[in-house]
């Protein structure tokens, strides 16, 4: 809807294929710097970006509403623009993006943050296929804010950042999924069981 990378394009440009959770590379130092510079402008409008991002997400991928209990049955997307819960969630996501940007040059801290968020998304029943959609809609929401500062290099840097963070979240989701599966298995069926026979 007005953005070249929205809609179905996000699947090919952002999504990792199954089994490729390690495929996304950490952004380069140059990309990190331009991301941090652009964030200084974006952060002035984080509430607005959060709302725009989620309304666009629900427009381009209506199936994403199923993950959000509060918005599942809302048909009038314009009403969502003034919804307090959506605003609060948008701010939480923007806060995560802000923390991620701050940790781009601290890979261990960024990894811990994103993996933990992926684990919590397992419990929200928010599967990894949706994570990359948020990145695409974020880019569409911030492009008009940055105006002439928006470049092809900046777009690639944000794409690389979202792919990297999404791959870490997917890793966390998979780890938590495996952990939960192991918890529900009987002790004799667990792959890590050890024989106690003499």
Image (cartoon, helix red, strand yellow):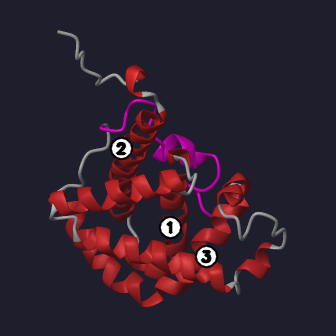
- CA neighbours of label 3 inside 10 A, class few (<14), some (14 to 19), many (20+): many
Position of residue 173 measured from the top left corner of the image (x, y, whole percent): 43, 46
Which quadrant would residue 113 be assigned to in this image? Answer: bottom left
Residue 133 versus residue 151 in the image, above or below: above
Give the CA separation, mark 1 to mark 3.
8 Å
- Estimate the spatial distance between the alpha carbons at disc 2 and disc 1, rounded to whole Å: 21 Å
Mark before the other along the chain sequence, 1 or 3: 3
Of the 4 image quadrants, the one containing the N terminus is bottom right
Q: Quadrant of residue 191?
A: top left
Which residue is disc 1 drawn over?
138
Of labels 2 and 3, the one closer to you: 2
Residue ID at (39%, 52%): 169
The answer to whether residue 168 is left or right of residue 184 is left
Q: Secondary structure at mark 3?
A: helix
The answer to which quarter of the image holds residue 25 is top left
Viewer-nearest of discs 2 and 1: 2
Write down the region rendered in magenta. Answer: 2-22
Q: Residue at x 15, y 64 (%)?
A: 106
Q: Position of residue 16 (x, y in %)?
A: 44, 39
Within the magenta stretch, is there residue 97?
no
Q: Quadrant of the C terminus?
A: top left
Helix, strand or loop under label 2:
helix
**Above/below status of 191 relative to 67:** above
């Amino acid at each position: 809807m007005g953005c070249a990378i929205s809609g179905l394009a996000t699947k090919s440009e952002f999504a990792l294929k199954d089994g490729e959770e390690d495929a996304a590379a950490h952004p380069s130092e140059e990309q990190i710097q331009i991301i941090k510079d652009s964030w200084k402008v974006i952060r002035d409008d984080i509430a607005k970006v959060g709302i725009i991002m989620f309304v666009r997400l629900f427009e381009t991928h209506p199936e994403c509403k199923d993950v959000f209990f509060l918005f599942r049955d809302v048909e009038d997307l314009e009403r969502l623009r003034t919804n307090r819960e959506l605003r609060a969630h948008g701010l939480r996501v923007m806060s995560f993006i802000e923390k991620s940007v701050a940790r781009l040059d601290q890979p261990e801290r960024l990894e811990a943050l994103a993996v933990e968020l992926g684990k919590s998304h397992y419990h929200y029943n928010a599967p990894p296929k949706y994570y990359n959609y948020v990145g695409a809609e974020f880019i569409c929401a911030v492009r008009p804010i940055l105006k002439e500062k928006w470049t092809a290099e900046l777009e690639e840097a944000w794409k690389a950042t979202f792919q990297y963070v999404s791959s870490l979240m997917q890793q966390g989701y998979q780890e938590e999924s495996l952990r939960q599966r192991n918890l529900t298995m009987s002790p004799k069926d667990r792959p890590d069981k050890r024989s106690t026979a003499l």
